[in-house]
Every structure is written in C-alpha cells, then in structure tokens.
Amino acid sequence: MTLVAGSYERFIWGYKLKTLNSPILKPLFSYPSHLSTIKCVAVAGPIAVSGGADDAIKIYDLSTSSEVGTLMDHKGAITALCFYTPSPSLSFPRNLLSGSEDGTVCIYDADPFVHLKTVRPHKRGVNDLTIHPSGRLALSVGRDSSLAMLNLVRGKRSFHCKLGKEATMIRYDSEGDRFFMVMEEKISLHESEDAKLVFEMESQKKVLSIAPGMNGLLFAGGEDHSVTSWDTKSGKVAFCIEGAHSSRVKGIVVLTTKNGGDDDNVVPYLVASASSDGVIRVWDVRMTNKDKPNPLVEACTKSRLTCLAGSSIKSFRRPQIGNCVTNKEQDITMEDS
C-alpha cells in the first residue's frame, strides 16, 4: 500500500505502508517536485500525479520511486486530479482528469499519458471533480458556485447549474448511485440520476477532506482536527476519532487489504489521514470503540501538508509517456521501493 502527500513547501512525499508483523511507513521519496505549492495529488496502482500552483502536473512511477514526466496543458494552478480505472481488478488507470484555476478540465489517456481534450465547465476556477465508476461522465464544482456534468465519451459539458453556495469538494460513492458535495461545514448527499438532495450532514467546523468508504460509510476531516465516519444510510455519525491530529485534517484515504489472499474478501479497516502539522497517520477503525484509539503507525514530514492520496493495489507495470514534457535535467534518483 502506498501513500503520497503534497505540501505547501512544494515537496512531494511518498511512503510504503507495511502492515505485517510490526506496521511501518517506509519512506520512498521526498523532494521539491514543483516550483511552488502542491495543491492536489492522485494515485492509481503504480502511478501517482501531483498538481501545483506552477500550472504543472508531475507524473511519478511508484515502482521505481522516480519522476517520469510533466504535463503542461493548463494556464492556471492545478486544483483537482482524478484517475479512472475501469475495474477494481485492474491496477493500471485508463484516464486522468485534471481541473485548474483557469476553469478548464483536461482529459488524458493514461496509457500512455496523452492529452485528449480540454473542456471548460466553469467560468471561474475548478474546485474539485469526480469520475463516475462507469467512466462515461464526471462531475465538477467551481468557484462560480456551479455544478457541471461532463460527457467523457464526447468530451464536452452536458449539464450545468448554479448552486446556492460555492462547493469545494465533490465525490461519487463507490457504486456511483449517489454523490457528495461539501459546502463549508455541510456535506450534502444527492441522487446521481437527477441530483435530488437526499439529506445533509453537518459537521461542527469546516470540512476540508472527504473519502467514501465501503458499507455506506463516508470519512471526513477538517478544522475540527478529527476524523469522522458518517453513516450515509441514516445521515448520522457512525464513529469519530476526536483529536486525530493537532491541526487541520487536509487529506483522508480509505485503504483496503485482502483477507487470507482471497480477492473477493476485501476488508476496509485502514484509514490514513494527513494534517497541516505535517503528520500522516494510519488508523485501524476497528479500534474506534476505545475511548482514545491510537494510530496504527505515523510519520512526520515536518512540512505543511496540503493533500493526501493512496492506493492498496500493487503492480509492476511501468507508465508509458506520450506527448508530455519530460524533465530529464531534474530526474531524481530516489530510494528504491
């Protein structure tokens, strides 16, 4: 299992999570990959990407712990990144979507990395985006307080509507039947078919990160320094790790492990969180019945973390680079994974 985090100080951090015997977060790499702040990261199998305020998307091969290329198709800071993998059994992604402060979304083929098309769903910057499990459409929210739907088959915007308030995050659930939107302290649940509001879940303070889990759970973190699990069937809190960090929670990743080697028996009990105090922690949510659960393992980066992504899928396949800008002069020799 791999975790990748970005920081305000433009550093990218990579860790390999080992849970057998004594759990550890083994450092894979850390170096200043961008010219300015890293604003978002995404991971799919052996591939990771990061987006920065320098308008660039960096591509990393996690199997060799190396940077392999750069995408420069936006004219603004990169604010959102999302991979599409056709099937959970496949470890290599098919497409990458990126959103930017220039109001555009770029669609890439991820095998190899080739820019396919640029769509402008918003008049102002893109705050976040999410891809439907079918891979046929995506949703985005922008600084113009609007929601947009993208037809990924035709490569164009198919729907657009104004929201009463600016949404900062949007995510499909694991089945794609519903999606979540975040507006400050509130998380709203909507039907995918017609965007009908199902109900709202309200946190005590501003929500800064969410991650849909299995069994109808949604994990959220933010300015309350906690990691909260919401039951999306009832709209109530399932459990909460209060004081999970000493500062704001800026990223949450739901990890899965295979029980007994059976690919059909997936046990979703590992959740990773990252805070602006520079600490990454991994939690065993089965221990939340304790008064004060301790993290399974943690790592301190001593930097102001801005985002976190991860993957529990292993692959030995290397990424292929199409017409992106490769940065041979800054090839980084990192610790072998």
Image (spheres, rainbow, N blue to C red):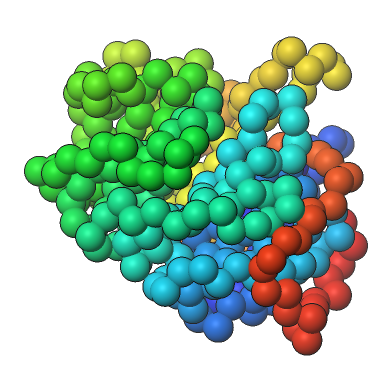
Identify the residue shown where x is 59% and y is 58%: 115
User: Is residue 34 placed above or below 64 in the rendered structure?
Assistant: below
Residue at the spot x=17%, y=40% of the render?
161
Q: Is residue 217 above or below residue 101?
A: above
Q: Residue 89, position in %: x, y?
A: 74, 25
Residue 266 visible, this angle: yes
* Quadrant assignment, res 62: bottom right
> In the picture provided, is 41 more to the left or to the right than 331?
left
Residue 34 sits in which quadrant? bottom right
Q: Position of residue 301 (x, y in %)?
A: 62, 68
Q: Position of residue 335 (x, y in %)?
A: 86, 67
Quadrant of the frame with the C terminus: bottom right
Image coordinates for residue 104, horizontal then vertical, percent:
37, 59
Viewer-proximal residue among 226 and 267: 267
* Residue most extreme to the front: 154
Q: Quadrant of the N terminus?
A: top right
From the viewer's perspective, tell me whether residue 294 is left or right of residue 258: left
> Residue, x 67% and y 74% (percent of image)?
325
In this orientation, which residue lies closer to the viewer: 306 or 140?
140
Q: Give the residue at x 38% y 44%.
A: 156
Residue 28 visible in the shown view: no
